[in-house]
Amino acid sequence: MNKIELIHGSCADQVSDVIVNAANDGLWAGGGICGVIFSKAGMKEITEACSKYKTPLNDGDAV
């Protein structure tokens, strides 16, 4: 049986294995939830990790 749970809070505060950030095709830090993800992950660390991928990404790509 599937379960749906509504949570009143930021998606950036949840414990998860994966975060999906569809903000831009260049994997740059941005505003909104994208900025929150980069801040929580560590700006330097996530920028370095993102720089290892060839950009721009195509629609539907996942890295």
Image (spheres, rainbow, N blue to C red):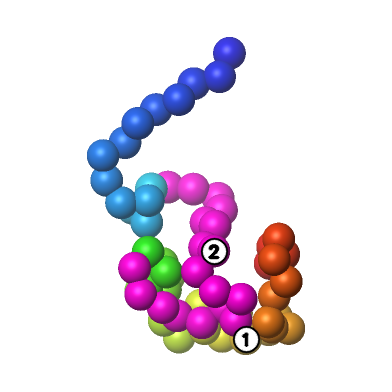
Quadrant containing the C terminus is bottom right
Instruction: Assess disc 1: are there few (<14), some (14-19) or many (≥20) residues with their C-alpha within 10 Å of its C-alpha.
Output: few
Q: Residue furthest front?
A: 59
Q: Nearer the viewer, residue 12 or 26?
A: 26
Chain part drawn in magenta: 15-32
16 shown above or below 23: above
Position in image of residue 62 (x %, y %): 69, 63
Residue, disc 1:
51
Position in image of residue 12 (x %, y %): 37, 56
* Residue at position x 54%, y 57% in the image: 20
Mark 1 and mark 2: span between their CA atoms? 16 Å
Location of residue 41 (image quadrant): bottom left
* Residue at position x 45%, y 86% in the image: 44
Q: Is residue 18 left or right of residue 40?
A: right
The amino acid on which the numbered mark 1 sits, given as a three-letter code, is Ser
Instruction: Assess disc 2: are there few (<14), some (14-19) or many (≥20) residues with their C-alpha within 10 Å of its C-alpha.
Output: few
Q: Residue furthest left?
A: 8
- Residue 9 visible to the viewer: yes
* Residue at position x 56%, y 53% in the image: 18
Location of residue 8 (image quadrant): top left
Residue 2 drawn in magenta: no
Q: Is residue 22 left or right of residue 55?
A: left
Q: Nearer the viewer, residue 50 or 17?
A: 50
- Residue 45 visible to the viewer: no
Residue, disc 2:
22
